[in-house]
Image (cartoon, helix red, strand yellow):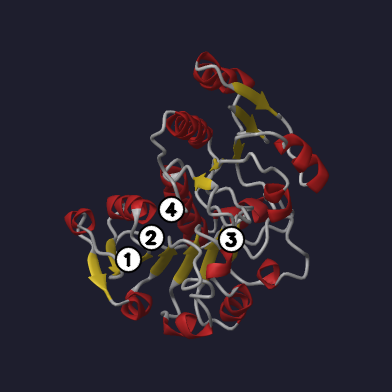
Amino acid sequence: MIIKLLEPLNVSEDLINELAQPLKDMGHEFVYYPTKTTDIDELKKRSEHADVIMIANNPYPREVIESNPELKLINVAFTGFDHVQLDNHNIKMCNASGYANTAVAELAIGLVLDVYRRITKGNEELRKPNFSGPFQGAEIKDKVVGIIGAGKIGLETAQLFKAFGATVIADDFMPTEEGKELGITYLPQDEVFKQADIVSLHVPLLPSTKGLVGKEKLEMMKPTAILINCARGPIVDNAALAQALNDGTIAGAGIDVFDMEPPIPQDYPLLQAKNAVLTPHVGFLTNEAMVRRAMIAFDNTIAYLNGNPINIVN
């Protein structure tokens, strides 16, 4: 079979070659494109005759998929796969879920620390000749943290918050024994929003979660509470969030994901909102996570070629 990796995976080419060697040893052809492209014609050309396509978070449009009748597997080296416009149920799709659990959990903690201790603001102000600090902050210890979506990433995030001395509650959509062993108290979702000092979102983007956090949910939160979103941008109505921050409905927010990928338009409401710490969708992006991602992606390909597909999402 012909396997094509259409974009870089943020690891060295040496590692790509090392991970691809078992495919070649099995008698398959492997082609690697070390640059990204969003050009439709170029994507069609790169995809031509491939049985297996490997991509990361680059959009993979329907038009490109339909141009290759030989395509059997789209291997997404990413957790989310809503950037792949796959309608053909004869083509399998797998993902690399789990590679960035630690990276995302740690960023959630980092955003809370930045919002609470005003680290970014302090760094900016300290460099000005008319320094206006220092800034009084808050501590995570003894706060109530609400986890919305207590899956693998949510549980790892909860574990880190517990290490800081916080009490953790979570919505009761899918309570687990692991969560109970961590000391998480499961409550109805609205109660989590009402009781938490910190609300951290870790749900996938689904029709049921799109716009989950809007004006209604934000008004349930304490005026001293903060919202963290390292999940998917459209889960939050960010215009409503900006308004809630500016009028004091909630105290702050740490946001890594938006309605679009960066760059963000200058008129985007959150860019001017009060007490918002924004990062450019880097929750998944650590050296360690990139290596794990590459390894999972190639394991997915090998498993499929051996007739035992894993991590199938459709």
Query: Looking at the image, do the residues carrying marks 1 and 2 touch, with CB atoms under 8 Å apart?
Result: yes
Q: Which SS class for mark 4?
A: helix
Q: Which mark is residue 143?
A: 1
Q: Amino acid at mark 3?
A: Val
Res. 47 mark: none
- How far across and down, in percent of the image, does residue 296 sit? 46, 34
Which amino acid lies under the numbered mark 1 shown in the image of this protein?
Answer: Lys
Residue 139 image label: 2
User: Mark 3 or mark 4, which is nearer the start of the sequence?
Assistant: 4
- Above or below residue 220? Residue 306 is above
Quarter of the image that includes the N terminus: top right
Q: Which residue is mark 3?
A: 277
Closer to us: 46 or 253: 46
Residue 39 seen in the figure: no
Horizontal relation, residue 114 to residue 62: left or right: left
Looking at marks 3 and 1 on the same chain, the residue that comes earlier in the sequence is marked by: 1
Closer to the eye: label 1 or 4: 4
Q: CA distance from mark 1 to mark 4?
A: 13 Å
Mark 4 surroundings: few (<14), some (14-19) or many (≥20) residues within 10 A: many
Q: Nearer the viewer, mark 2 or mark 4?
A: 4
Q: Secondary structure at mark 2?
A: loop
Marks 1/2: CA–CA distance: 8 Å
Q: Earlier in the sequence, mark 3 or mark 2?
A: 2
Cα distance between the residues tagged 3 and 1: 19 Å
The residue mark sitting in front, 3 or 2, is 3
- Between the residue at mark 3 and the residue at mark 2, the CA separation in whole angstroms equals 17 Å
Label whose residue precedes the other's in the sequence (2 or 4): 4
